């Protein structure tokens, strides 16, 4: 069996993945708070853990992997959005949940095996909180229930901080109902205008952290294999999950492997509305950018490195995918039961999800279109839906102003082959006049010409005009 190695945030090192039960490999990933469209930063962990899900299914078998990703549908942000819009909370969460599923599906993400909503597990949260109180790890005061952080000796192990350092270096809420500033909320009271449920501590609603502990316990058990999310969740969310889960479940480890992806930037800057570089996945899709282009850009950078979204990367991704679709236009995927993943691709993914290397290996498969198609699908590319987008003839969608027309792609491919042959002859004769002529005509038509030892690559750039390519073949 293929050996998988993953970087465990808990041990801060790469470890060989050994599931608790190879017949039931279990993974939990923190999902969205559903009150608005998902921005592209929200989408990165979805794509990252979708690749891991695909890898686990390939290695252990699709029937032996369970993937859970939750929806937070009770939250103060949702309450505020309802108050602003005059719409009901249920209407907002239902709509935005479907938006999320549609947008992530467009990026090639498979739906998890379970997608629990927090509001469906209130009773289980109450039961867990009662257990924490009974064992002295939590207390009720002024309608609130709080977790006693100092009662859990390993608090801070995941993030590498001590409780005293956290208090000294962070802003913590000081409130009359807290015994210690570091104690965090498990349950809080609700007024008449706020969603609430009956509990032993009065009408109220759960704190954020308890929902993931309760849902993962119900669906995956007290201990499971992998817990994932963005590194912004490591503290306090994941730290608090570990504390309350271990204390409620008799000191068990919760998850054996903790994986965290790095954050995303846009053109080298932090994404923010004030800088004007904030956009949602839907914004990109509505501009005509195929979801697989977004996925390709994401996977071009290792998940544990900061990722920079740029227009140039999107253009390059679009050009590469367009060429792959051209090469495989007449092919059908190999039957799933008969497909055998390429060893180099599988090795790259098994080495802590080295998707950058896996894409590099795919680029070298153009001589074997069937292998390219099958292995690209393993990484979530070459879907039937996206194939239509890349093969449109009557309509010409734009990707950052770049044509995705299949006929143009085919024309550029043929010209690229001619230029490569011409270049080889020129290197032998030392006469590069014809190479320069073709390059000049391409540049005048708005085509970026890239030549390297690996060959010739032609990329349509801003101002691309296919009519100016006539006569080059």
Image (cartoon, rainbow, N blue to C red):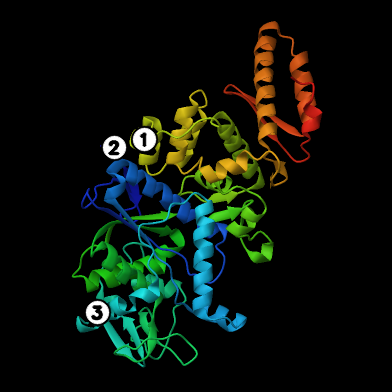
Q: Callout 1 environment at 10 Å: few (<14), some (14 to 19), or many (20+)?
A: some
User: Going from the N terminus, do you reach mark 2 or mark 1 first?
Assistant: 2
Disc 2 to disc 1, C-alpha distance: 8 Å
- In this view, the residue in front, 317 or 405, is 405
Quadrant where the C terminus is found in the figure: top right
User: Going from the N terminus, do you reach mark 1 or mark 3 first?
Assistant: 3
The correct choice, above or below, for 90 with respect to 252 in the image is: below
Q: Position of residue 205 (x, y in %)?
A: 39, 83
The correct choice, above or below, for 19 with respect to 185 in the image is: above
Residue drawn 51% across the image and 79% down it? 89
Which residue, given by chain and number where applicable, does mark 3 sit on? Answer: 132
Q: Callout 3 environment at 10 Å: few (<14), some (14 to 19), or many (20+)?
A: many
Nearer mark to the viewer, of 3 and 2: 2
- In this view, the residue in front, 455 or 379, is 379
Q: Are marks 2 and 1 in contact (CB under 8 Å)?
A: yes
Which residue, given by chain and number where applicable, does mark 1 sit on? Answer: 347
Q: Position of residue 224 (x, y in %)?
A: 26, 58
The correct choice, above or below, for 55 with respect to 26 in the image is: above
Q: Which mark is residue 16?
A: none
Q: Which mark is residue 2?
A: 2
Quadrant where the N terminus is found in the figure: top left
User: Going from the N terminus, do you reach mark 3 or mark 2 first?
Assistant: 2
- Report whether residue 181 is seen: yes
> What is the secondary structure assignment of the residue under circle 2?
loop
Q: Quadrant of residue 313?
A: top right
Q: Quadrant of residue 162?
A: bottom left
Q: Position of residue 364 (x, y in %)?
A: 50, 27
Query: In the rendered view, does 92 fall on the left or right side of 174?
Result: right
Q: Position of residue 243 (x, y in %)?
A: 29, 70
């Amino acid at each position: 069996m293929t050996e998988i190695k993953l970087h465990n945030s808990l041990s801060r090192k790469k470890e060989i993945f050994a599931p608790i039960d190879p017949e039931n490999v279990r993974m939990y990933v923190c999902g969205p708070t559903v009150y608005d469209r998902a921005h592209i930063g929200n989408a990165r962990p979805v794509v990252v853990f979708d690749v891991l899900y695909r890898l686990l299914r390939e290695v252990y078998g699709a029937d032996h992997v369970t993937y859970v990703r939750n929806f937070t549908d009770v939250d103060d942000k949702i309450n505020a959005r309802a108050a602003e819009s005059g719409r009901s909370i249920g209407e907002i969460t239902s709509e935005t949940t479907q938006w999320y599923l549609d947008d992530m599906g467009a990026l090639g993400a498979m739906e998890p095996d379970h997608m629990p909503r927090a509001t469906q597990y209130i009773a289980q949260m109450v039961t867990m909180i009662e257990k924490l109180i009974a064992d002295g790890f939590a207390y009720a005061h002024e309608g609130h229930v709080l977790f006693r952080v100092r009662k859990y000796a390993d608090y801070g192990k995941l993030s590498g901080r001590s409780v005293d350092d956290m208090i000294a270096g962070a802003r913590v809420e000081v409130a009359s109902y807290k015994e210690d500033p570091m104690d965090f909320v498990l349950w809080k009271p609700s007024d008449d205008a706020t969603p609430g449920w009956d509990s032993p501590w009065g009408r109220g609603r759960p704190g954020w952290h308890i929902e993931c502990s309760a849902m993962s316990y119900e669906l995956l058990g007290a201990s499971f294999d992998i817990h994932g999310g963005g590194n912004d969740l490591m503290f306090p969310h994941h730290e608090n999950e570990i504390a309350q889960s271990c204390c409620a479940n008799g000191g068990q480890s919760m998850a054996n492997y903790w994986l965290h992806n790095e954050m995303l930037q846009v053109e080298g800057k932090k994404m923010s509305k004030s800088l004007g570089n904030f956009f949602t996945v839907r914004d990109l899709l509505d501009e005509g950018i195929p979801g697989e282009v977004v996925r390709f850009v994401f996977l071009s950078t290792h998940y544990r490195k900061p990722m920079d979204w740029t227009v140039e990367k999107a253009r390059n991704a679009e050009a590469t995918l367009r060429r792959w679709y051209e090469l495989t236009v007449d092919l059908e995927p190999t039957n799933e039961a008969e497909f055998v993943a390429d060893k180099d691709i599988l090795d790259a993914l098994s080495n802590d999800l080295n998707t950058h290397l896996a894409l590099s290996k795919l680029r070298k498969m153009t001589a074997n279109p069937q292998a390219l198609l099958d292995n690209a699908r393993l990484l979530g590319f070459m879907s039937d839906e996206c194939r239509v987008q890349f093969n449109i003839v009557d309509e010409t969608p734009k990707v950052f102003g770049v044509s995705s027309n299949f006929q143009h792609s085919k024309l550029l491919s043929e010209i690229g082959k001619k230029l490569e042959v011409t270049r080889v002859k020129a290197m032998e004769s030392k006469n590069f006049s014809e190479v320069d002529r073709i390059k000049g005509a391409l540049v005048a038509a708005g085509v970026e010409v890239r030549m390297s030892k690996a060959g010739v690559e032609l990329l349509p750039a801003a101002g691309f005009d296919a009519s100016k390519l006539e006569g080059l073949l």
